[in-house]
Amino acid sequence: MYRRSFLPTLVIALFTAVAPALAAPVISADRPVFDFGTITAGKKVDHVFTLKNRGDAPLAILKTKTSCGCTVANVSTKSIEPGRTAELKTTFDSANFSGKITKTITVETNDPATPSFTLTVKGTIREELVVSPRQLNLGVIKVGGSKEVQLTVENHGERPVKIVSVTTPMPQVKAAARRTALKPGENATITVTVTPRNEDRFLSGYLAIGTDIPGRPEISVPLYGSVGK
């Protein structure tokens, strides 16, 4: 009789001792992927992800990391109780992007099964003012000489765009736009003249095209080349 009554009691006692050790947090999100569709370059996209703890122990948010500086993420709380939720607010700045993009936010937690949980922001960015080419390779320019190259800017938007300035920090480079007001569908040429100095060996810098586009006041065009004797 003693053995029969002792065995169930022992099993219950062992289960009770082990059960707390099995408790763990489980992270999830209602929509881990957010597609913002198509926007115009320069706009900021705000979105709130909802994180939930589906486990039976508190979920600790240890760190949040974004795939680039264009995205900012802030969580409303660092600890989520079982069955509760938290908000992860994100902002994506599209100023320097075009075409299809995908950015991620990594949430590091104490979830033993998913210590790194990934959220995704994606969509398509349409440029109002398209620059071609997107960078200038000047090749080799001899000292004492100069080289003239051209850029084309075209208004792909739905409203008029103004080119308010064309500047560069490089003293060897001069640039000017032949037209500064572009209606939708119109284009203009920017002429760039490069005159190397005697002490130059390489040319590296950029051209800054100032615009009146909201959220995108400047478009940067890399410029590089080498100098021959």
Image (cartoon, helix red, strand yellow):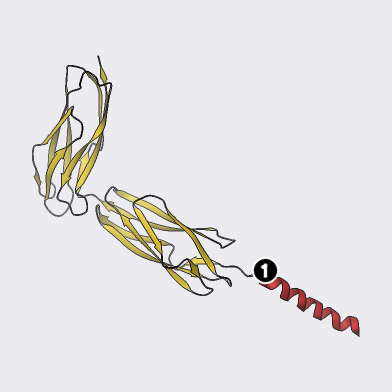
> Residue at 76% across / 78% down in the picture?
12
Q: Which residue is the extreme one toward the top?
A: 229
Give the amino acid at mark 1.
Ala
Instruction: Say if 168 sits above or below 155 in the image.
Output: above
Q: Residue at x 25, y 56 (%)?
A: 43
Q: Which residue is mark 1?
A: 21
Q: Residue at x 37, y 66 (%)?
A: 48
The mark tally for this picture is 1
How far from the left and from the top, in percent, is residue 165? 13, 42
Does 124 sit left or right of 162 as displayed? Answer: right
For residue 22, above or below residue 68? below
Give residue 112's position: percent from left, percent from top.
59, 61
Hey, which quadrant is residue 202 in on the image?
top left
Is the C terminus in the top left, top right, bottom left or bottom right quadrant?
A: top left
* Crowd class of label 1 (few under 14; some 14 to 19; many from 20; radius 10 Å): few
Residue farthest toward the bottom in the current orientation of the protein: 1
Tell me the element at label 1. Answer: helix
- Left of 210 or right of it: where is 22? right
